[in-house]
Image: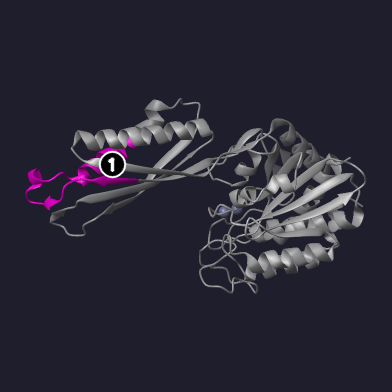
Amino acid sequence: MNTIQNIRKFHEDLTAFRQDLHAHPELGLEEYRTAGLVAQKLRSFGIEVHEGVGKTGVVGVLRAGSGHRKIGLRADMDALPMQEENDLPYKSTIAHKMHACGHDGHTTMLLGAAQYLAQTKKFNGTVHFIFQPGEEGAGGAQAMLQDDLFTRFPCDAIFGMHNSPELEIGEFRINHGPIMAGGAFFDIAITGLGAHASRPETGIDPIVVGAQIVLALQTILSRNITAFESASLSVTRVESSSSAYNVIPHHVVLGGTVRCFSNEIMEFIKKRVTEISQGIASSHGAEAKVDFKVIFVPTVNNKEKSDFFAETAKILLGERNVKTNAKKLMGSEDFGFMLEHIEGAYGMIGNGKGFSPHHPNYNFNDEAIPYGAALYAKLVENFLT
Ligand SMILES: [Zn+2]
Ligand SMILES: [Zn+2]
């Protein structure tokens, strides 16, 4: 019997667990109920449990044999602040909170692997099951890292997965190098000089300054960065300190986001956003203050670990269901912070075609559980030989 068939024995229980998490979503760094249930499950499998790692994170430790090698498997647990529009028997019971990214499924797949590995123990070394809080911008990966995650639970390699509604159930894709983008949010606060709108010559109009900045920022990607690099920059907010039709405001704040695939490019874009904003503002006698916050680093796969992940997936899912030249995604993922410390890889597991994550009608597909759980388990059996 193969690993997927073995894990199917727990499929009914795991599905019930996933649907219970779905009905009780918790936002980033508030996953007290979820973390409690995860800890309880791990203990019931006979796995050593460490709670409160990075506030609401949980780490399970399972050893077998006398091997010294250690592997880390990571899943995320948080939900999103949005209203579910599905009409499911287990739909969210909490207004404006929803498991719309499938982290309920990721948590369940990793628990499925833990249950199987605790029973079979066909490996030689240590597994660290890392249940991470707050992936959706709440800084959960960094919270665990600041809590000395990899000093307390050292790993020779780490692996993570996200479900993908662009892939059928049982399909998997991965690539070398960057797989998901790094992301930053910025605010540009422009101070001019307010005036009566009929007499603009008596003031300094921050709206005109802001409009020039919005357009000039688009030249960073088109004129300053090689066409071989992919990046995006969008101004998504424009806020004036006045709501009157006949007042030139004193202040305008522009806000937006940047995505790209290397920390160097992100630093360069930050420098150019600052130079352009301050330069344009000062040429008009206005002032611009730039607050540029990097929220996610790019998720960069180690070549060797990515190949190992792909080979393991091929054994389990069959050669033709594993794509190794997957295109990069402009979305972001905070597993990238963990990959800055430990070599590893991140891949996409098929969720069946459907609504994309963050859509109010998205739902994790329970049929994916045995595949994801078996893949986590197989990584352990192949790595800890
Ligand atoms: Zn998400
Ligand atoms: Zn997600």
| Residue 73 in the image, given as x and y percentages of width and height | 74, 48
Where's residue 333, x and y in %? Answer: 58, 47
Rendering quarter of residue 175: top right
Whether residue 370 is visible here, answered yes or no, is yes
Residue corresponding to mark 1: 288
Asked if residue 284 lies left or right of residue 201, the reply is right
Residue 204 colored magenta?
yes
Q: Residue 140: where, in percent of width, then height? A: 59, 53
User: Quarter holding the C terminus?
Assistant: top right
35, above or below 382, in the image: below
Q: Amino acid at mark 1?
A: Ala
The answer to whether 140 is drawn above or below residue 23 in the figure is above
Which residue sits at x=53%, y=40%? Answer: 182
Q: Label 1, secondary structure: give it.
A: strand
Q: Which residue is drawn at the image coordinates 78% and 65% (left, top)?
A: 41
> Mark 1, residues whose alpha carbon is within 10 Å: few (<14), some, or many (≥20)?
many
